[in-house]
């Protein structure tokens, strides 16, 4: 039985993430998608919200489990000895340096933590969570970027966040 872990911020999950999840789920007996924290990022969605969105879009993939962890990926890996490998998606050469550094750091912290990279599909290679957030904040069409069943939740959250940003900017301008 081979088990892989697919870590990320998933703020929010996109069609690009879902493409990697679907393909990795055919390569391993079990795939654990885990929401982790990059302390240098500002997130729009809470961890429970990100877990819920991931659970919704993967509910029909029988060997996928969703989890979250507030700590180092290398420690999560240590806590779950059944995990064999870390899976990451690579969209472009611009991802490579950062992903390569993370893969080495994870292996340095836990020598058992090997990373394998899956190239993004040609149709999703340009999609990122931050691009999705911008489109959603301006009320754009999300249909090519995130699964239809979570459009409503993503739009509602991000239009509210954008309205709040504008309100705070207006207050600052008028001070
Ligand atoms: O989707 P992202 O933002 O590129 O994912 C990055 C993430 C969250 C997987 C990474 O920041 C991470 O592993 N965070 C947990 C803390 C950790 O282990 N950091 C050291 C790895 S260099």
Image (cartoon, rainbow, N blue to C red):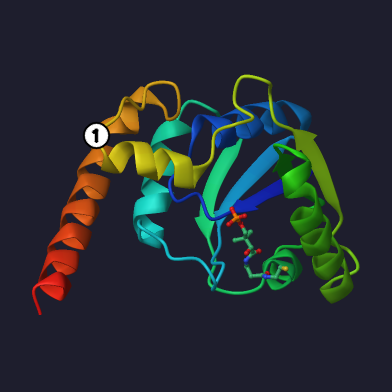
Q: Which one is nearer the viewer's eye here, 10 or 165?
A: 165
Quarter of the view holding residue 79: bottom right
Whether 148 is drawn above or below 54: the answer is above
Say which residue appears at 32% left-offset and 25% top-offset. Answer: 141
The answer to whether 64 appears left or right of 43 in the picture is right
The percent position of residue 81, horizontal first and vertical second, equals 77, 62
Residue furthest to the front: 174
Ligand 1, what quadrant?
bottom right
Give the SS element for disc 1. loop
Quarter of the view holding residue 136: top left
The percent position of residue 146, horizontal first and vertical second, equals 42, 30
Say which residue appears at 83% left-offset and 56% top-offset. Answer: 100
Image quarter of the C terminus: bottom left
Q: Which one is nearer the viewer's eye here, 69 or 88?
A: 88
Residue furthest to the bottom: 175
Whether 96 is drawn above or below 107: the answer is above
Q: Which residue is mark 1?
A: 139
The answer to whether 81 appears left or right of 130 in the picture is right
Quarter of the view holding residue 38: bottom right
Q: Is residue 82 visible?
A: no
The percent position of residue 147, horizontal first and vertical second, equals 41, 27
């Amino acid at each position: 039985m081979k088990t892989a872990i697919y870590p990320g911020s998933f703020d929010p999950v996109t069609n690009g993430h879902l493409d990697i999840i679907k393909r990795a789920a055919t390569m391993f007996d079990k795939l654990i998608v885990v929401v982790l924290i990059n302390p240098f990022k500002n997130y729009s969605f809470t961890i429970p919200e990100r877990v819920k969105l991931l659970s919704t879009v993967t509910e029909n993939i029988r060997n996928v489990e969703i989890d979250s962890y507030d700590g180092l990926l290398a420690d999560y890996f240590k806590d779950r000895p059944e995990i064999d490998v870390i899976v990451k998606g690579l969209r472009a050469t611009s991802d490579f340096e950062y992903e390569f550094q993370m893969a080495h750091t994870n292996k340095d912290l836990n020598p058992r933590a090997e990373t394998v990279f899956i190239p993004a599909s040609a149709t999703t290679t340009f999609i990122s969570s931050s691009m999705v957030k911008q489109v959603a904040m301006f009320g754009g069409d999300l249909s090519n970027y995130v699964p239809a069943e979570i459009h409503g939740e993503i739009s509602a959250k991000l239009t509210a966040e954008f309205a709040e940003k504008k309100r705070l900017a207006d207050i600052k301008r008028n001070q």
